[in-house]
Image (tube, rainbow, N blue to C red):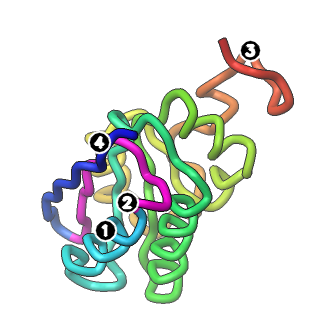
Amino acid sequence: MSPLHLHHEHHAGATVITLAGEIDLASAPALRQFIADVRQRPADQLIFDMANVSFVDSSGLRVLLDAFAVAQQHGGGVHLTALAGAPARLIETTQLGEHLRLHTSTAIALAAILTAPDLPASGDISTAEIYPEQSPAQSVR
């Protein structure tokens, strides 16, 4: 089990939360509290940099969905960046890419927010683009 490391940066209308490690039953409460502590306004855009996240279980997914629900209620949004491996497969399998905005990098997510903060989910990539040669039922090498 890899502990979850959390870091944040504030930008105009957005909070970037950089995660490293595993988001699971053990770390989900800390992530939930971290989001509550660092979110400046409920309407802010939350960007989760997932580049160094190796695993997400249903508890971690619940935290991300709860952050999305709060953001959506207040006119904000949730963005996931740099998804790879098991976390990317989870987002693809659960079809959450239809609700959360997906981006290849945090810089692209910030640029998207600055140019079009009210766009619906999709971002600059889809989960099909993460694994273009795979269908959702196939495993990834």
> What amino acid does circle 4 point to?
Ala
Residue at (13%, 58%) from the top-left corner? 9
Which mark identifies residue 133?
Answer: 3
The tag on residue 30 is 1
Give the residue displayed 29% in from the left and 42% down from the top: 20
- 25 in magenta: yes
- With respect to residue 59, does 29 lie above or below? below
Quadrant location, the C terminus: top right
Gap in angstroms between the C-alphas marked 2 and 1:
5 Å
Q: Earlier in the sequence, mark 4 or mark 3?
A: 4
Residue at position x 45%, y 63% in the image: 78
Q: Tell me if residue 121 comes above or below residue 92 in the rendering.
A: below
Estimate the x, y position of residue 121 in percent, counting from the top left.
58, 58
Q: Earlier in the sequence, mark 3 or mark 2?
A: 2
Q: Secondary structure at mark 2?
A: loop
Q: CA distance from mark 2 to mark 4?
A: 11 Å
Pointer 4: residues within 10 angstroms few (<14), some, or many (20+)? some
**Disc 2, disc 1: CB below 8 Å?**
yes
Q: CA distance from mark 4 to mark 3?
A: 27 Å
Instruction: Assign the magenta stretch its main secondary structure.
Output: strand
Q: Which residue is mark 4?
A: 20
Q: Nearer the viewer, mark 3 or mark 1?
A: 1
Mark 4 or mark 3: which is in front?
4
